[in-house]
Image (cartoon, grey):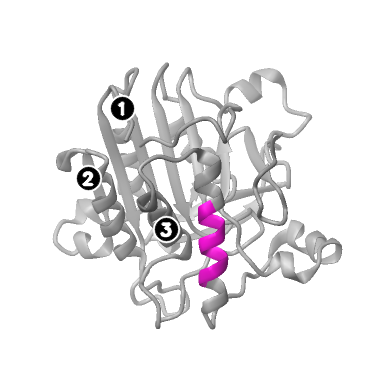
Amino acid sequence: MAVVSGRKRALLVGVSYKGDTSRELTGAAEDVKDMNSLLKKFLFPEGSIHMLTEELGAKDPLKAPTRENIMKEMRWLVEGCRAGDSLVFHFSGHGRQRKDDNGDEVDGRDEELCPVDYKESGNILDDDINDAIVKPLTQGVKLHAIIDTCHSGTMLDLPYLCRFNRMGLCSRYKWVGQTRWRLSPKKERAMVPVGGHAISISGCKDYQNSLEPDNTQAGGGVMTRSFLEAVGSRRTMTYGELLDSMRAKVHHRLQQSSSGKCLVTGCLGSLAAKCLPCCFLSVQEPQLCSSEEFNVYEEQFIL
């Protein structure tokens, strides 16, 4: 396993929405526990892993996954970062879309994370996430965001999306720009880190839902399960190999699950429904975004 030269720090957030009957998730807290175990194998010090769940929040209000606590911990994650540091942000919960109000989205829709107090405090917009944990990254710092929510494809507002072979073979890929043509160069530069490298691995495309398996399977989100299994299956792998493995595992899990259907929503979903066979819309596909282009089948995945 390759070694990171700097410090390691992680923020893990799992939101179950307990008591919110229509939105309650059964596996979000379990996702956080399992991610914590994985990071310890990657030699993340216990004191450098902060976790926010309702279970922890019942004992300490500062550990509840509220909007205020999440934003505060995001600032902690990148505070004082320096060359060689490895940072991880993991979120398991609900995600939503809303109309883009500043013209920086290709599809005209912003993505947002839903904290436990979303009804009272509102959601966390992708623009705010970018401001909090992407822009502050200094030269030589690497951030990995693992986002297990609906509509999570471009949740960090990173400028490049890696588009793999549609049939899931992933032997061919290309980077696709995610900023609208009318943005000025100054505006586009403002979306990327000062000098660090941000990478997001997310549960599905922006117009898809990311699912939990049914109750007969292991708890947790399908995307987080596939990530943990893929990373744990090999000592070393490239980013391309990681996405290949994750997509295969997601497809397998959803085929086994009685609830394994992925709904397509939003304006892109409407267009996709007219243009693509339904088989392509029924399976969520993990996505890879980055603040810079790189060869995904050569660069090693390292936390």
**Quadrant of the image occupied by residue 98:** bottom right
Q: Which residue is mark 3?
A: 224
Question: Marks 3 and 2: in contact by CB < 8 Å?
Answer: no
| SS for dot 3 | helix
The magenta segment: 245-253
Nearer to me, 49 or 256: 256
Question: Marks 1 and 3: in contact by CB < 8 Å?
Answer: no
Q: Label 2 is placed on what type of residue?
A: Lys
Q: Label 3 is placed on what type of residue?
A: Thr
Q: Is residue 167 magenta?
A: no
Kindly report the distance in space between the C-alpha atoms of the residues bearing marks 2 and 1.
14 Å
Q: Position of residue 264 (x, y in %)?
A: 69, 66
Q: Is residue 248 magenta?
A: yes
**Quadrant of the image occupied by residue 142:** top left
Residue plotted at (40% across, 52% down): 91
Kindly report the distance in space between the C-alpha atoms of the residues bearing marks 2 and 3.
16 Å
Q: Which residue is mark 1?
A: 4
- Comes first in the chain, label 3 or label 1: 1
Q: Residues within 10 Å of mark 2 (few under 14, many from 20)?
A: few
Residue plotted at (40% across, 83% down): 216
Q: Position of residue 44 (x, y in %)?
A: 23, 39
